[in-house]
Image (cartoon, helix red, strand yellow):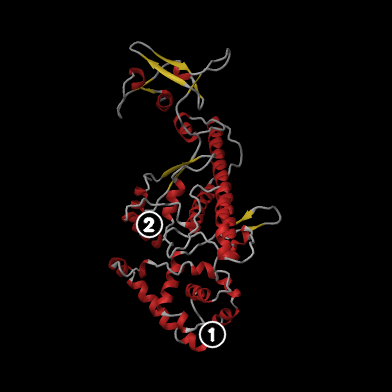
Amino acid sequence: NYVWAAAVVSSRAFTESLVSGTAGSDGETSVLLPLLDMMNHRPLTRVSWITNDATIGFQAGAVIEAQSEMVNNYGAKSNEELLLGYGFCIPGNPLSCYHIKLNYSRDPQAADKQMILEQAHIASCDHYIRADGLPRDLLPMLRVMVMTETDVYYVKQAMARGEEPKLGQLGLRIELRARFLLAFLLRKKLDALPQIECVPSTENGRQAVLYRKEIESILRSTLSDLDKSESRLLACASKLFADDLHSLPRYVCDNGQQVDTIDEQLNTSAEDRLVAESSDDQQSRSKKPRTVLPAQQFVDDVLVTEESFAHDADFLAAVEQVDIDEDVLLVLFILRIRMCSALPWHTAVQRLESFKHPMLVYDDPDTAEAYGEMMMEMGEVHDSLFPLLTEHFPDVFPPENFTPELFLWAAGVTESFRLEVPARCVDAADGCDVE
């Protein structure tokens, strides 16, 4: 009996401030209003609550037709709130959402990232995803979460100059990483949803299933939108790459070089505009015919991976004869790209020549000290390889192109602009993306 009575009060009670018409306090009393508390909830219904010293009433914001139900509006409540507070759900509730709470407290750079978020006026880690799109601050916060140490360093430098952090100008890599992270989190949640084997026999059970299915629908809809957004980004990257243009962070802008950025509010027209605006400039910088690579070839044709070594037969033949760590091989290949204009990534690497990893910013003693161990380690790696590689493969590793200074620069490039791409392929049988 007590549980029943408690449920009656919790699901039907109004606050005392509604009756008195005055602002309530955190500990205000709840009251029951017989008859009025029987009115069902309908989202977006316009209802005014009118009170005076003797009466309380609800005034409809629209004409109520004869024989139709009189309804109330309990407020802007999702199905989760309705289910927990009142024991029912609204099918197709436009206010339904999936709550995601981001946590970066274990990030070694948590304090710096929190400062960046505060400067960007992003205060909350709680985000509510609806079927009609992502909340405004979710992607900007994810961009900060996936920043590398280099990104954080240069954003802080800009903030020290009095600039607000431009989270939409960190290049394609950050845009993709933010979406990859969100998709990973949502897929993990979707996979964890228990499967409903049969229809529950109770009304409470049926309401719970309705809520579960709505959450699943929101997750699937959001993942579908993320996949489309990711595909457009990859297609945009392929177009830029085909024209010797590249989406780089704003801080990689030196010596008058143009830096191409992805619009913060990504959509198809923005991507088309980006490519169109770049096309005039590319005619003076590139004589290659304009070709557009399909998005699914992004990993094979745009990114620099171990498979890319096949474009350089001499390099591949040399490294197959030695035992070198994969990360170090990428550093060496970046230097090969820098010296070989025939390789497809040569222009991209050239545009990074003025870039400095924070460990190479010698005019900042604190930063140089923080990266001292990394520099020492990279120096030892270089000394273990050279001049040995040059002696055995002089044409592949000429000493002037593999100096300690250039090796450190290339190590900084690979460390700063690394991108882990979830492996996807097209299943010809059903046309679905397969992880």
In the image, residue 237 above or below residue 195: below
Whether residue 363 sits left or right of residue 350 in the image: it is left
Whether residue 59 sits left or right of residue 201 in the image: it is left
Residue position marked by numbered label 2 in the rendering:
155
Quarter that holds the N terminus: top left
Tell me which amino acid carries mark 2. Answer: Val
Residue in front for this viewpoint, 348 or 131: 348
Snapshot quadrant of residue 123: top left
- What is the crowding at mark 1: few (fewer than 14 residues within 10 Å), some, or many (at least 20)? few
Separation of residues labelled 1 and 2 (CA atoms)? 40 Å
What x and y, as percent, mark residue 359?
A: 36, 69
Snapshot quadrant of residue 237: bottom right
In the image, residue 102 above or below residue 246: above
What x and y, as percent, mark residue 342?
A: 58, 74
What x and y, as percent, mark residue 18?
A: 36, 20
In the image, residue 334 above or below residue 109: below
Identify the secondary structure beneath mark 2. helix
Q: Residue furthest right?
A: 429
What x and y, as percent, mark residue 429?
A: 71, 55
Tell me which amino acid carries mark 1. Answer: Asp
Residue position marked by numbered label 1 in the rendering:
395
Q: Residue furthest front?
A: 284
Residue at screen point 48% across, 64% down? 418
Residue in front for this viewpoint, 246 or 377: 246
- What is the crowding at mark 2: few (fewer than 14 residues within 10 Å), some, or many (at least 20)? many
Q: Earlier in the sequence, mark 1 or mark 2?
A: 2
Residue at screen point 33% across, 22% down? 17
In the image, residue 287 above or below residue 73: below
Snapshot quadrant of residue 11: top left
